[in-house]
Structures are given as C-alpha cells and as structure tokens.
Amino acid sequence: MLDLHTRLATLKRPPLLARAARFGVDDYRRAVHLRRILQCDALPRHGHAIMQLLDIEAELDALRKDDAASYRPGRHVDVLIAILGEAHLLRATTPQVV
C-alpha cells in the first residue's frame, strides 16, 4: 500500500483536468467544498480527507476511462481541486524537517 505522499506524487491525469483543478484551487474553501464532496458534518483531518478524496477520484477516473454515461467531468474537477487544496493545507500544517 502506498503512503499518502507517494499517492499524491504519482497522481497523473489528463492535462485539461489537471489545469482546470489548478485554476480552481485558489478558490478552495475547506468548510464548504470538502463538506459537500464528502457529505459530512464534521470535517476530517487533512490526511484522512485526502485519502477519502483519492478513493473518490479513483472511482471517477475509472468511470472516465470506461466512457460511462454517469461520469461527470465537473465533479471530477471538484474532487481534484479538493485534493490539491487539502495537499496545500497539509503541507502548510506539517512541520518542516531541516
């Protein structure tokens, strides 16, 4: 099983999806967006939230690759934005080793 940082580092998606997510990450608001995506009242810690988001994103990516009728690109971008936003917040709250 891959650790969190490895899963984030190896996440590769089509350029259009990645670019859309990068454009949206500046507007990411954890209390609003994460609660809506995870459908929860209490927000999990950053690491746990990223793991949940990566699982959701993997399902969406499988739908994309299968050309499933239920695939929604907007939802996929929303989840990618949340992953990037949570990764930024995790890095900001993790003590740096010098």
Image (cartoon, rainbow, N blue to C red):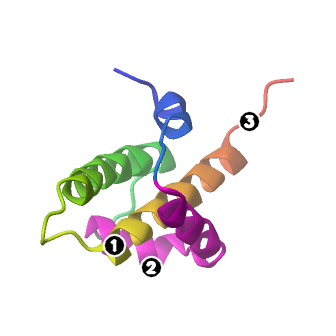
Q: Is residue 73 left or right of residue 46?
A: left
Q: Is residue 34 left or right of residue 84?
A: left
Q: What is the span of residues highlighted in magenta in the rendered image?
A: 14-40
Element under disc 1: helix
Q: How crowded is mark 2: few (under 14 residues within 10 Å), some or many (20 or more)?
A: few
Type of amino acid at the residue the image marks with label 1:
Pro
Q: Is 48 situated above or below 38?
A: above
**Residue 73, label in figure:** 1
Q: Which of 94 and 42 is in front in this view?
A: 94
Q: Is 48 situated above or below 41?
A: above
Mark 1 or mark 3, which has the lower sequence index? 1
Q: Is residue 2 left or right of residue 10?
A: left
Element under disc 3: loop
Q: In which quarter of the image is residue 71?
A: bottom left
**Residue 95, label in figure:** 3
Q: How crowded is mark 1: few (under 14 residues within 10 Å), some or many (20 or more)?
A: few
Q: Residues within 10 Å of mark 3 (few under 14, many from 20)?
A: few
Q: Going 34% across and 64% down the picture, which residue do you hit? A: 42
Q: Is residue 96 magenta?
A: no
C-alpha separation, residue under disc 1 versus residue under disc 3: 35 Å
C-alpha separation, residue under disc 2 versus residue under disc 1: 20 Å
Type of amino acid at the residue the image marks with label 2:
Val
Q: Going 79% across and 25% down the picture, which residue do you hit? A: 97
Q: Is residue 41 left or right of residue 8?
A: left
Query: Residue beneath label 2, please?
Result: 32
Q: Does the magenta stretch include residue 39?
A: yes
Type of amino acid at the residue the image marks with label 3:
Pro
Q: Going 29% across and 64% down the picture, which residue do you hit? A: 38
Q: In which quarter of the image is residue 41?
A: bottom left
